[in-house]
Amino acid sequence: MTTDLLFAIRELRVNNIINVNHLDIKKDKVTCITGESGAGKSTLLKTLNKMITPDSGEIFYKGTSLKEIDSVQHRRKVIMLSQVPLIFPGTIKDNLIMGYKLNGKKPCDDEILKQAIHNMQMTKELHEDAGTLSGGEKQRLALARILLLKADVYLLDEPTSALDEDTEMMILEYFIREIKKKQASLLMITHSNTVNEQFAEERIYLSQSNGQ
Ligand SMILES: Nc1ncnc2c1ncn2[C@@H]1O[C@H](COP(=O)(O)OP(=O)(O)OP(=O)(O)O)[C@@H](O)[C@H]1O
Ligand SMILES: [Mg+2]
């Protein structure tokens, strides 16, 4: 299998939800995934992250079958943000450094963490409780957390669904600019036509019946 592709999906079947015969995802691109609710978009992203094992078929990551790649190693390079972002009990700072801990790296200093929050248009302090943040603030905290990490691929499941459109566009523009600097790829699920039109370099539409 060619190493030029980020993901090559072949004859993939998952739980009667996903039925994708042939789908290629390119490296170094922003790829947006759209499709009806229940079409299997989140399931597909989890499968790419090795959180779900397919019933049959194969996924190749840069030419190597996911079956041959260690799950923990894979998730350090291919970072996923789930549809309901995971917020850990504790402060904003605790949440920002949790990413480092999970990835086995040393945390950076508070100035960088403060800047990370500021860059997400949040006017909160590091010591504030993350549990009381609004839905949109939790999404931005989760985005800030993963942006501090070095990843090859970001898999984002409706990362800005709780934000107003102006903030959504600002946040995504910033996030994409930053990941391009890291030469990372982005695969993002969205229900927003505006996001899809504005940011997608590649587009995938997942239909209920799949069968791509
Ligand atoms: N672990 C599971 N076991 C059984 N069915 C599941 C499981 N996870 C998801 N499903 C079902 O699979 C279908 C696809 O779910 P998925 O979350 O992938 O959809 P989605 O395209 O992300 O939808 P949305 O746009 O609403 O987020 C749904 O009908 C869901 O109920
Ligand atoms: Mg979903």
Image: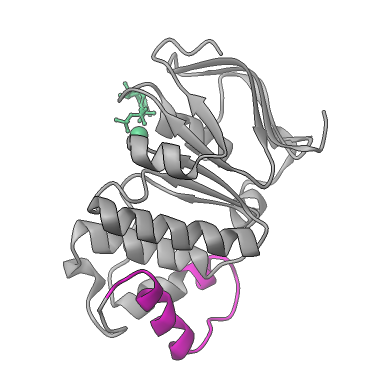
Residue at 48%, 37% in the rendered image: 32
Residue 112 is left or right of residue 83, and the answer is right
The x, y position of residue 53, in whole percent, is 55, 30
Where the C terminus falls, by quadrant? top right
Query: Given the current orientation, which residue lies at the most extreme right position?
Result: 2
Relative to 21, 42 lies left or right:
left
Drawn side of residue 82 relative to residue 176, left or right: left
Q: Quadrant of ligand 2?
A: top left
The location of residue 202, given as percent across then percent down, is: 57, 34
Magenta-drawn segment: 99-122
Residue at the image point whose x is 49% and y is 30% from the top: 44
Quarter of the figure that contains the N terminus: top right
Q: Residue at 36% across / 69% down in the picture?
A: 120
Q: Look at the image and tell me whether residue 189 can be seen.
A: no
Which image quadrant is residue 150 in?
bottom right
Asked if residue 44 is among those painted magenta in the image, a careful observer would answer no
